[in-house]
Amino acid sequence: MVEMYGDGKIRPLSPVTTFEASDIQNAFRFLQKGDHIGKAVIRMPRDISTIPREPVPFSLEFDSRSTYLITGGFGGLGSGLMQFMKQRGARNFVVMSPSAGSKPEHQSFIADMELQGCSVVPVAGQVQDEQDVERAIAAAKSPIKGVIHLAMVLQNVSILGMQASDWKEVMAPKCQGAMNLHHVLQSQPQSLDFFLLAGSIAAHTESSGQGNYAAANTYLEAFCQYRHSLGFPASIISICPIEDAGFVAENCQAREAVTNQGFSYLTQREFLECVELAVRSSSPKSCSSNSDAVGMLGPQTWHNSSALIMGLKSPKPLSDPTNHTSWRHDRRMGFYHNVNTENVTKAGGEESQLGTFLTAVRTNAAILDTKQAAETLALEIGKKVFTLILRDPEHVHVGMTMQEIGLDSLMAIELKRWWRQTFGREVSVLEMMGSGSLLDLGSLAVGTLKKVHNVE
């Protein structure tokens, strides 16, 4: 074999397409196309440490010797959280709530956790009372290494009819409670691994009758950044309705109100995945040395990678007139929309004309050679663009330029996703942004469909 190679009778297959190790993703894409000739070769550098690598995910682990303090922890979310933490090593919990340990279901849960080798110490008290917080911390059998602040009170009432007591009752457990936990634990010798705050999606959307609750959760987001400015860990999850655990799942009136507002639900499993991410991202990020520790100004104060929002998704397309999602007309949410993965061909559907056209093309691809094809597609693409930027689609005309429309690169990325799902082929953001008008985009769509249907 060696002699045959030396004599030139055996040669490598050609052509050889070479990719650097750092470009290995494109090498796989090259092979996946199935139309290549020859071999693809990956060239490794002498120093493999120069190859960019993604961090390897690892399972979150809690310290079995430490204690974890949970306020409002005997509800559906709290009990699920403790089971989740137990599976990842936690063994000691202190649970604080006004009725902690007084109900049969509390005792049953505590006994069940003890059978699994865990200690759950109930402390009846109000987290907004600093002395009660001190009692809860004193009840810990080992140093407290993590806090999860779930305590909450709902008092739904319109802002015009709201009394001072309605405001204080909702604000106290979340706001004063968070501050009490911060102050008392700050005086303890041990340091925390995480300080997780349970916020609400109500802080980011218009929820009728929940102005007090929205304010309380907005405070928690600012409090998270306040702890970071002091160098302490903190993270917050703006929790959406959970369909199989928690207050909304257990309260029929709350569930009906949430459904009427058009919010979608997530599962407890998805909530726990968010908890894991929040615990991982609880550490404060470093700030510039010349910034004021508490009142620092600058762009960095508007970004908080330790704040997560769950379930900001509408169950219906945002352009659907029957959609009651309260934030559908909020300009801040303009880039959130539902991509319709089906060709809607029902009478009255917003994409009925486009669906009808695409169905006709599948039957007779020669339609794509007509002048009306580009105009039809241009109009439908224009309607989609207007939907993305929250403008009335009735004002679309095919002669509009990209500048007149106001299509930016962020919207183009969303349009690119819709384009792929609607027309079955990729188109680059550069191609879309470089189009002079909607009619040019329509012609680009015609070219895309011709490739899909193998039309010359």
Image (cartoon, rainbow, N blue to C red):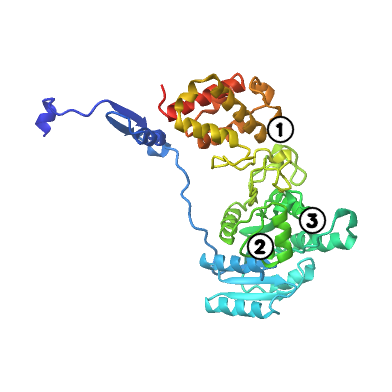
Residue 307 visible in rendering: no
Task: Give the residue pinned by disc 3.
Answer: 210
Give the quadrant of residue 24: top left
Q: Is residue 167 visible?
A: yes
Instruction: Give x and y (percent) for residue 211.
Output: 81, 53
* Quadrant of the drawing holding the C terminus: top left
Q: Nearer the viewer, residue 289 or 159?
A: 159
Separation of residues labelled 3 and 1 (CA atoms): 29 Å
Of 124 and 76, the residue lying toward us: 76
Is 195 placed above or below 31 here? below
What's the CA distance linking mark 3 and mark 2?
23 Å
Distance in Å between CA atoms under marks 1 and 2: 42 Å
Residue that carries the numbered disc 1 in the rendered image: 391
Residue type at mark 2? Ile
Q: Give the mark nearest the N terminus, 3 or 2.
A: 2
Give, as a three-letter code, the residue at label 3: Gln
State the image coordinates of residue 257 (x, y, percent, origin top left): 74, 58
Which callout, 3 or 1, points at the residue further toward the start of the chain?
3
**Quarter occupied by residue 183:** bottom right
Residue type at tag 1: Arg
Q: Residue 246 location, x and y as percent?
A: 66, 65
Please determine whether, in this image, residue 21 is positioned above or below residue 277: above
Q: Find disc 2 in the rendering and name its residue.
A: 148
Q: Which secondary structure, mark 2?
A: strand
Look at 58% across and 26% down and name the residue there: 376
The crowding category of the residue bearing disc 2, from other C-alpha atoms within 10 Å (few below 14, some 14 to 19, many at least 20), is many
Do callouts 3 and 1 mark residues in contact (Cβ within 8 Å)?
A: no
